[in-house]
Amino acid sequence: MRFTQALLLVALATTFGASQEVQLSINFVYGGMATRIVTGKVSGEWHGLIPLSPNKPVTIAFDLSVRVQSLITVKDVTSGGDGVIVIQMQNAEVKGTAGDQPLELIVTSNGDVKFSWGAMSFDSTKLPEADRKKLQQLLTLSPSLTVSPKGKIKSFHLPEEVKKVMPEIDVQFVNAVVSSTLQTLLPAPLPEKPIKVGQNWDVEFPILFFDVTEPLYLPINCTLAEVKGDEAVIKASAETVGEAELTLKRWSEKAPKVTFSRGFFSAGGEILFLLSVGVPQRSTWKFRAEAEGSITPSEKGASPIPFRFRLSAEFKEHLVF
């Protein structure tokens, strides 16, 4: 009898939870800190130019694992509830194979870098001290993000110290492109109004890294899939495909011209949102992308060289408080 009553209570609680509207908003707390850990795998194939073959296209298959750990701190909360978050990278590593050769990249918390790929190797600890310090300064910069309570990345800011390391960098351009790219790669859009289980909402994010007169948009469909006690499960998906001549914005006049002629991109994810504290605590994502185009070196009179690539990736991320 007690077992039957327990089942009835669970069923009633589930029905009640599904019928109620929930408010999904991030609650930023001044001074709040958390460690963000991202792990994943990336595999695919690239056909085109690489540093080892700057004049002749080559085909390279890759299969890599990724782990990145960073400390995020809420350094300010605006009157509108936006959170200004500072990101401090703690360590990163990429391991696997590329072109049938073992590849490893390690970035430490103090900005040192170790890289090996087949017979190639690099160790920043063996650089002249001035060069090592410059690289450390660059890799330990702490950029900041301004994020709305609904998960929209409003802005990305490199610290002014970057000018001391890279005086030629266009900070405003980098801020705009990185802000858009981050939101496209890891979207966490939340609905403006309270929502019930099973309801969905659509959002569009601008893609700013192409040289076009009007921004392109990536449509994302989201659904409140489930509410389990304190946990709300959000599912998100996005897909875009097209054939058009789109040229990447160039970081400098010395950068090559990269033009896409066709492409495909899809993303699917699941976000677990903690209702009591107002935080997207962990998520999983799958990505697929394919593209073809050409790269034209910056030298005068250079001819475009075709490229194509495909990749698939799976990532998991979570916050440790």
Image (spheres, helix red, strand yellow):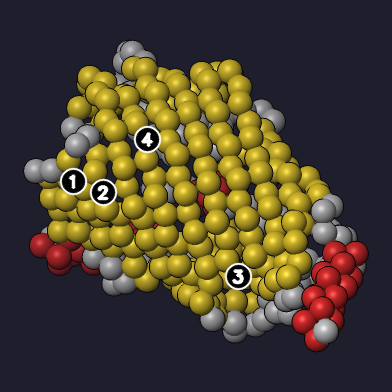
3 or 182, which is in the foreground? 3
Which type of secondary structure does the marked residue at label 1 adopt? strand
| Amino acid at pointer 2 | Gly
Which type of secondary structure does the marked residue at label 3 adopt? strand
Q: Residues within 10 Å of mark 4 (few under 14, many from 20)?
A: some
| Residues at marks 3 and 1, CA–CA distance in whole angstroms | 34 Å
| Badge 4 or badge 3: first in the primary sequence | 4
Q: Can the viewer see residue 158?
A: no
Which type of secondary structure does the marked residue at label 4 adopt? strand
Residue denoted by label 2: 96
| Amino acid at pointer 1 | Pro
- For the residues labelled 1 and 2, say whether their Cβ atoms are less than 8 Å apart: yes
Count up the numbered dots: 4
Going 78% across and 45% down the picture, which residue do you hit? 202
- For the residues labelled 2 and 3, say whether their Cβ atoms are less than 8 Å apart: no
Residue denoted by label 1: 102
Residue denoted by label 4: 44
**In the rendering, at what x and y percent does residue 248 appear?**
50, 31
| Residues at marks 4 and 3, CA–CA distance in whole angstroms | 29 Å
| Badge 3 or badge 1: first in the primary sequence | 1
Residue denoted by label 3: 281
